[in-house]
Image: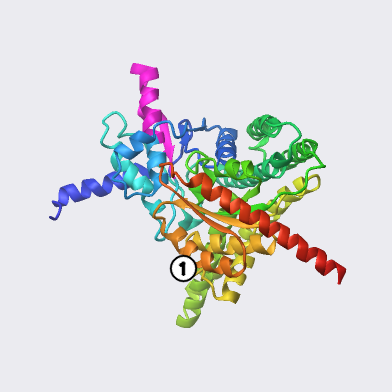
């Protein structure tokens, strides 16, 4: 049945009027808790510019997310919907008559392409509109379509300065995570790493809030160096290296501990040293995709002999190249500061990932989605002598299903242990058996790899 014109117009307005990019100054910005460190350092970056941002409590109201969805949605949609509904309900109870939903802004970014993530904020807008007391909360989005540009989110030049700080904060969060994963499996005293890194994270948050607006990156790097140096002292040097496991997959599930049932800690419990794909990898991929699209526009303008199009594409090309160069420079600075003290795992270079996929004819960046990063990232782990790969994703996730279809037979031929870990909020009865079996295979792989390495060194 076709909607009457007035209803159709109202429906479209609901999806655009309160799902937009607008100045959040003076509002309490509510950020979903995805990667715990990344979300908190991002919130600190907003606070550095005067926006009272906070990370939403997570996974405490999953029942609400499930109640207002059909079950066909991606699992992260249910989790984040439950988080925002639960927070608003609790806040209304706490504040009573003083509660005003327009004092808040809900931050829900999006991605273009076939992934359902691109529709989260629209779908959640419709659900929030069903509650008279919540229907006026604005939803702020940033999109991969323009590289998560922050234009309009803060006034004037502040938007650009904020984006610079937010990128560095994201890389700092990645490196803090990698310090944890390098140290915790070898700590002298159980629990020492977590206690130390919780304090270190708070110190970094406090420094971002104080010095972030001035973009005092040297101070942030210096603190990171101190954290890495002190973290190294927690390691028991007499403990041999364990099998290294690389995690790839859908960005929310692999970075949200509650949703993936704390898979990193579980793998560590069964004898692994784990590295998860970074947040920075995704941001760099988005920038690289922008560059590829601009390159396509330039070629098309050349074929059409469109002089104005060539000039515009050339201008965008220069801007895109400068942006990628700046990101690579800053990322390298952050990693190198930590690596002066601790041998953490470096990050994957996006052009290298594309070249490897093209060379082996495994997949194409023209298809896009996280599958390119998961497939390429897994091969990078293999190149770096990891002993197993885990693909973490929401049940029915299309890009991750593609990843599994390609990686499973490929890594089998390479004799590298591989495990699919799909999640939808239920506890699978064979999960521990699957993890234990996978870790046994990874341990065997490590032993065989070391035997071969010794044999090669004798020749």
Quadrant location of residue 126? top left
SS for callout 1 = loop
Q: Residue at x 81, y 69 (%)?
A: 456
Question: Looking at this view, is 407 or 320 the one in front?
Answer: 407
Residue 99 part of the magenta segment? yes
Q: Main secondary structure of the magenta part?
A: helix
Where 445 sits versus 239, above or below? below
Q: Label 1: few (<14), some or many (≥20) within 10 Å? A: few
Where 317 sits versus 329, above or below? below
Counting from the top left corner in percent of width and height, residue 139 is at: 39, 40
**Residue 424 located left or right of residue 438:** left
Q: Residue at x 55, y 36 (%)?
A: 43
**Residue 82 located left or right of residue 210:** left
Question: Looking at this view, is 219 or 259 the one in front?
Answer: 259
Q: Which residue is mark 1?
A: 367
Question: Looking at this view, is 204 or 140 the one in front?
Answer: 204
Question: Looking at this view, is 152 or 355 the one in front?
Answer: 355
Q: How many marks?
A: 1
Which part of the image, by quadrant, shows the N terminus? bottom left
Which part of the image, by quadrant, shows the C terminus? bottom right
Quadrant location of residue 80? top left
Counting from the top left corner in percent of width and height, residue 231 is at: 76, 37
Where 62 sits versus 358, above or below? above
Q: Residue at x 47, y 65 (%)?
A: 405
Query: Which region shows up in magenta?
Result: 83-108
Residue 117 part of the magenta segment? no
Give the colour scheme of this rendering. rainbow
Counting from the top left corner in percent of width and height, residue 199 is at: 68, 29
């Amino acid at each position: 049945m076709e909607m009457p014109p007035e209803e159709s117009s109202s429906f479209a307005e609901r999806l655009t009027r309160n799902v937009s990019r607008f100045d959040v100054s003076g509002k309490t910005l509510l950020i979903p808790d995805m990667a715990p460190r990344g979300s908190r350092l991002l919130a600190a970056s907003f606070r550095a510019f005067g926006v009272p941002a906070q990370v939403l409590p997570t996974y405490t109201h999953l029942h609400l997310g499930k109640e207002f969805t059909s079950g066909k949605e991606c699992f992260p949609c249910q989790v984040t919907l439950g988080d925002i509904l639960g927070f608003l309900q609790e806040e209304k109870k706490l504040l009573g008559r003083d509660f005003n939903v327009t004092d808040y802004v809900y931050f829900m970014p999006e991605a273009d392409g076939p992934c359902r993530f691109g529709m989260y904020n629209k779908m959640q807008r419709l659900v929030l509109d069903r509650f008279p007391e919540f229907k006026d909360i604005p939803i702020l989005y940033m999109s991969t379509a323009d590289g998560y540009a922050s234009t309009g989110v803060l006034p004037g030049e502040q938007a650009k300065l904020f984006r610079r700080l937010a990128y560095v904060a994201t890389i700092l969060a990645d490196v803090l995570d990698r310090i944890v994963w390098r140290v915790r499996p070898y700590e002298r005293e159980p629990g020492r790493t977590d206690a130390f890194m919780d304090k270190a994270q708070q110190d970094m948050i406090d420094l971002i809030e104080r010095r972030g607006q001035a973009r005092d990156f040297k101070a942030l790097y210096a603190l990171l160096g101190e954290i890495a140096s002190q973290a190294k002292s927690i390691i028991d040097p007499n403990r041999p290296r364990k099998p290294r496991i690389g995690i790839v997959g859908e960005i929310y599930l692999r970075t949200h501990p509650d949703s993936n049932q704390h898979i990193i800690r579980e793998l560590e419990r069964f004898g692994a040293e784990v590295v998860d794909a970074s947040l920075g990898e995704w941001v760099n991929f988005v920038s690289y995709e922008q560059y590829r699209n601009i390159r396509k526009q330039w070629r098309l303008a050349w074929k059409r002999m469109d002089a104005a199009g060539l000039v515009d594409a050339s201008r965008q090309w220069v801007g895109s190249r400068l942006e990628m160069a700046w990101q690579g420079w800053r990322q390298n600075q952050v990693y190198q500061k930590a690596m002066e003290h601790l041998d953490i795992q470096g990050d994957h270079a996006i052009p290298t990932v594309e070249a490897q996929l093209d060379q082996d004819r495994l997949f194409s960046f023209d298809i896009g989605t996280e599958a390119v990063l998961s497939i390429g990232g897994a091969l990078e782990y293999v190149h770096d002598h990891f002993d197993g790969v885990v693909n973490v994703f929401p049940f029915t996730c299309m890009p991750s299903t593609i990843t599994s279809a390609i990686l499973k037979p490929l890594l089998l031929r390479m004799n590298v242990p591989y495990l699919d870990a799909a999640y939808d909020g239920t506890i699978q009865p064979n999960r521990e058996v699957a993890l234990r079996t996978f870790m046994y295979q990874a341990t065997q792989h490590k032993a065989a790899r070391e035997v071969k390495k010794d044999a090669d060194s004798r020749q």
